Image (cartoon, grey):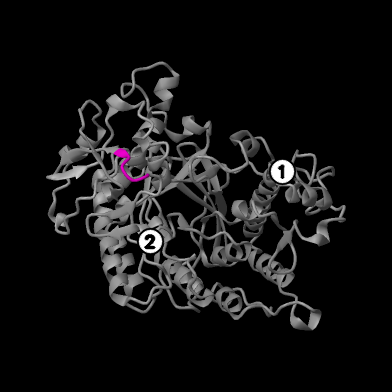
Amino acid sequence: PSSSSSSSSGPIPKPLPLTPEGTPPNFQPPHPALCFHIHATSQRARYTTVHLPHGPVPTPVFMPVGTKGTLKGLTPMDVTGSNALNNQIILANTYHLALQPGTELVRDVGTAIRGEVVGKGDEGGLHEFMGWDRNILTDSGGFQMVSLLKLAEITEEGVTFENPFLDRGEEIGICERDGQEQAYPDETVKNNKKRSAGQSLSAPTINNNTSQYDYTDKNNEQLQQSDHQYPKTKSQRMLLRPEDSIYHQNNIGSDIIMALDDVVSSTADDRIRFEIATYRTLRWLDRCHAAHRRPHDQNLFPIVQGGLDTSPGGLRDICLAGFRLRDEKAPGYAIGGLAGGESKDDFWRVVHHCCCALPDTKPRYLMGVGYPLDLVVCTALGVDMYDCVYPTRTARFGVALVDGETPGTLRLKSHHCAEDYRVIMKGCGCVACSDGNGDGDGGGYTRARLHAMLKNDNPLAVSLVTHHNLAYMMELTRRMREAIKKDAYGDFARSFVRDQFRGKDNGGQDVPTWVKDALAAAGIPLDK
C-alpha cells in the first residue's frame, strides 16, 4: 500500500510491517476503540483485521446496508446463523433513524428492557434495539444532501431538510439554545406518536453567521440532559448540524461513526460550490470532534471530499492536507463524494489518489460502492471497506448476483427462468441455492420456482434472493482475502475481469479502458 505517491503509475512502496493472523487487539490511546492489524499485502491490496468493540472485522469487507436498523427481508439470526453470510458489520443511517423511530428511543431501549432507570444505566443503543451483537457503522446524514437535495438547504450551520414524513401542521418539540430554536426531545411526552418526526433536529430558524458560535463542552452537555420542559411548535423543516449528527450517533452507539461532511453531487458543474464544501467539511469535522462524547467506545472517521479534482494542490489534496493536521484524532478514514454518476475514469482516479495519500496504518472506507467489479478494482488500489444498497435493493427487483459475463446478474423474473430447474448459482451456500448450511452441497430453490414466486409477489422470494446476493458479496470478499494472503491478488483480479469480459472475438464485451488503467496503476497489468 502506498502513502507517498498519487500518480497513476507510481512505484509500489516497500512492504509494511505485518501482524500475524489471530493476534489479540491492543486497544490504547489515542484510539481506544480500534486496533488495526495488517496481515498480508499483494501489490497495493491488503488483508487486514479492524478490531472494534463488538469484535474483529476482516477486510476487504462489504457492509450490508440496514438503513433503519434492519436488513430488509432478513433477521439478525438469518445473518449471524448462516455460514454463507456471517458478516461482522452492517451499516445504518443516522438521518433516517433520527426521524423514525428517534435516537433517544434507540438509546434507552437497553435500560428499559432491563427495567433500569432511563439515563442512569448503560445505554443500549441500536445493538440491543435490533438484537445485533456485532459491529455497526453509521453514516452521518451527509449523503442525504445529495439524495434529498430537493428537500435540503445547506448553510454553514448545517443542512436544513423538509421533513418527508410530516404532514403540514404536525408538531415537533423544540427548545431554546444559542438564541435559536433547537429541536430536542421533550422526554415528558415520549408517548406522543408524532414525537420522532423532529427528534434532536433544529427548527427552521437559520443564521448564516453561526460559525462564530462557541460550541463548548457546556453546550454539548446540554444535549445529554433529559429533564427539561420543552415547548412545542409546528414545523416541517429541520436542521441537522455536525453537533446533531454526532449526538444521534452517540445515542445509536455504533462502533464507527462518520463526521458530517458537506456533500456535493459528483456530477455538479460548480467549482465554487465544491470549494466551499471542501473547506466546510474541515470546519465541520472540528465541530464533530468537539461534540463527540463517546471516543472511548466509538470511532469517528473523517470523510475525504473535494469533488473530482485530483490535480496537485487541488480540492482533494486540500481536504487531505487538512486531515493530516488532525490525523491523531482519526482512527480511520472514508472516501466520499463518489458513486454518484461520475465517469468511471474519474471514479478510479479519485480512489487511487486518496488511497495513495491516506496513511497505510489506518483503515480506508470507500462509501456507497458495491458493484462486484468496483470492489475488485478498488481493493487493488488499496481500499479496505465498502457499503452499498445494491445487493439488497436489486434483490427486491428479482435480480440475483452471479459469476460470469458482465453485468454479472440473473433476472429471475425473465421468461428464460420460467422453466429453468437449476439453482441461482451452483456451489453457493445461501438458503436459496442450498440447504442453507453454507457448504453449497445441494437442495435449494430452482430458478423456475423463484420466477413463479416473484411473479406472484411472494415476499419469501425476495428474502431468498436477498440472502443469496449478500452471500455472493461475502464469498467474493472471502476470495479476495485469500488471494491477498497468497500474494496472488493480481491473478485473482485478472481472472475475475476476464470472466466478466470475454472479448468481442469470443461473443462478449471487451475490458473497459478504465478497468485496464486502474489495475495498471495498482501494478496489475491485464496483458500479463
| Residue under the point 16% across and 38% down | 218
Q: Is residue 41 above or below residue 37?
A: below
Residue type pointed to by label 2: Leu
Residue 295 lies in quadrant: top left
Outermost residue to the top:
115
Which label number is shown at residue 149? 2
Please identify the dominant SS of the magenta region. loop
Q: Is residue 321 visible?
A: no
Q: Which of 510/177 is in front?
A: 177
Residue 288 percent across, percent down from the top left: 28, 49
Question: Nearer the N terminus, badge 1 or badge 2?
Answer: 2
Q: Secondary structure at mark 2?
A: helix
Q: Is residue 198 above or below residue 113?
A: below
Q: Is residue 503 left or right of residue 206?
A: right
Q: Which of 235/88 is in front?
A: 235
Residue 482 lies in quadrant: bottom right
Q: Is residue 172 visible?
A: yes
| Residue under the point 33% across and 46% down | 168
Crowding near the residue tagged with mark 1, few <14, some 14–19, many ≥20 C-alpha atoms within 10 Å: few
Residue 442 percent across, percent down from the top left: 85, 44
Q: Is residue 149 magenta?
A: no
Q: Which residue is mark 1?
A: 458
Magenta residues, as a range?
Answer: 167-171
